[in-house]
């Protein structure tokens, strides 16, 4: 976890996806990400327009996220959508 920082994606668990991005394995229903519409099974391809190729990438990008809005590019089935997560 991101050492005590309340990240935009607090409450979101991910693992390596088969292709690009990271697979969302769990979303805390009370989290900002859930409020933004992120769901289990989504694949996060980008965070704030930075590609994430691995869980390490994902963690590193999240550490650099400031307050405000975090923009996620998410693959859900055949569709690719943007989700805006309001950081607390």
Image: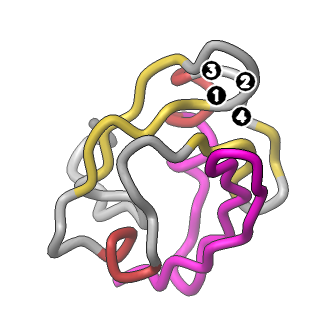
x, y (%) of residue 40?
36, 47
User: Toward the viewer: 58 or 18?
Assistant: 18
For residue 54, the mark is: 3
**How crowded is the residue under tag 4: few (<14 C-alpha within 10 Å), some, or many (20+)?**
many
CB atoms of marks 4 and 1 within 8 Å: yes
Q: Residue 53 — which label?
A: 2
Q: Secondary structure at mark 3?
A: loop
Neighbor class of circle 1 (other Cα within 10 Å; few <14, some 14-19, many 20+) is some
Q: Residue at x 62, y 51 (%)?
A: 76
Q: Nearer the viewer, mark 4 or mark 1?
A: 4
Can you give x and y, in whole percent of width and height, for residue 47 in the image? 69, 54
Question: What are the residue bounds of the magenta stretch?
Answer: 60-88
Q: Between marks 3 and 4, how big is the CA–CA gap? A: 6 Å
Q: What residue sits 45% from the left and 80% below the top?
A: 36
Q: Is residue 20 left or right of residue 88?
A: right
Q: Is residue 82 magenta?
A: yes
Q: Which residue is mark 4?
A: 52
Residue beneath disc 1:
57
Looking at the image, how many numbered discs can be counted on the residues? 4
Tell me if label 2 and label 4 are in contact, CB under 8 Å.
Answer: yes
Q: Are marks 1 and 2 in contact (CB under 8 Å)?
A: yes
In space, the residues marked 4 and 1 are separated at their CA atoms by: 5 Å
Sequence order check: which comes first, mark 4 or mark 1? 4
Classify mark 4: helix, strand or loop: loop
């Amino acid at each position: 976890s991101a050492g005590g920082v309340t990240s935009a994606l607090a409450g979101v668990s991910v693992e390596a996806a088969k292709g690009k991005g990271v697979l969302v394995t769990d979303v805390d229903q009370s989290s900002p990400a859930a409020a933004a519409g992120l769901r289990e099974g989504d694949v996060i391809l980008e965070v704030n327009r930075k590609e994430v190729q691995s869980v390490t990438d994902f963690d590193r990008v999240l550490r650099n996220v400031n307050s405000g809005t975090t923009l996620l590019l998410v693959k859900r089935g055949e569709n690719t959508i943007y989700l805006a997560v309001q950081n607390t």
